[in-house]
Image (spheres, rainbow, N blue to C red):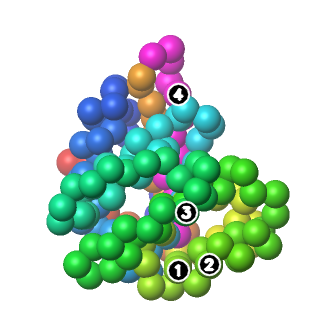
Amino acid sequence: MPDIAHLVLDEAASADLAGRLAPALGPGDTVLLEGGIGAGKTHFARHVILALLQTPEDIPSPTFTLVQVYDTAEFEIWHTDLYRLDSPDQVDELGVVDAMETALCLVEWPDRLGDMAPGNALQISFELVKEGTARQVSLSSTDQTWHQRLAGFFQ
């Protein structure tokens, strides 16, 4: 799938984008959230999760816990922040690789996965555009099924 780029001007627009993407996600999907510190990865993931939960709840950053798990009516959501890990072996110890088969996995700092990153993952990159809150959000994947699943997403 070629990159789909979208400019989000503020946190509300990012939350809206996450809410529109959420219904296209499900069990066995992995979303790799890339970008520097403060780029908006956790905020985006939080709003994907909130859009999929039947009952809203507090969605803390997994920076210190490394993994937060949420239950929807149909599947689990694993929200992971791998920033503090030193090696891909530590990712395996967390159970993230196994979860990628059955849960929706939202992975911050996916470079820590090494070669364990699934080839069918959706990559979402966040880049600060200018001073302030605007970000360029780019979606891409080498798996062509994402192109079909996200057809019309930005229209």
The residue that label 4 is drawn on is 128
**Label located before the other in sequence (4 or 1):** 1
Q: Residue at the location (37% across, 51% down)?
A: 59
Q: How far separated are the C-alphas under marks 3 and 4? A: 25 Å
Q: Amino acid at mark 3?
A: Val
Pointer 1 and pointer 3: residues touching (CB < 8 Å)?
no
Q: Nearer the viewer, residue 123 or 80?
A: 80
Give the image quarter of residue 67: bottom right
Q: Please rate how many residues cluster around mark 3, counting C-alpha atoms within 10 Å: few if below 14, some from 14 to 19, many from 20.
A: some
Q: Is residue 30 above or below residue 60?
A: below
Q: Please rate how many residues cluster around mark 2, counting C-alpha atoms within 10 Å: few if below 14, some from 14 to 19, many from 20.
A: few
Pointer 1 and pointer 2: residues touching (CB < 8 Å)?
yes
Q: Nearer the viewer, residue 70 or 112?
A: 70
Q: Closer to the observer: label 1 or label 3? A: 3
Q: Nearer the viewer, residue 53 or 64?
A: 64
Residue 10 vs residue 119: left or right?
left
Can the viewer see residue 50? yes
Q: Which mark is residue 95?
A: 2
SS at circle 3: strand
Residue 155 vs residue 63: left or right?
left
Span of residues in magenta:
121-132
The residue that label 3 is drawn on is 67
Q: How far separated are the C-alphas under marks 4 and 1? A: 30 Å
Pointer 3 and pointer 4: residues touching (CB < 8 Å)?
no
**Label located before the other in sequence (4 or 2):** 2
The residue that label 1 is drawn on is 99
Q: How far separated are the C-alphas under marks 4 and 2? A: 31 Å
Q: Please rate how many residues cluster around mark 1, counting C-alpha atoms within 10 Å: few if below 14, some from 14 to 19, many from 20.
A: some
Pointer 4 and pointer 2: residues touching (CB < 8 Å)?
no
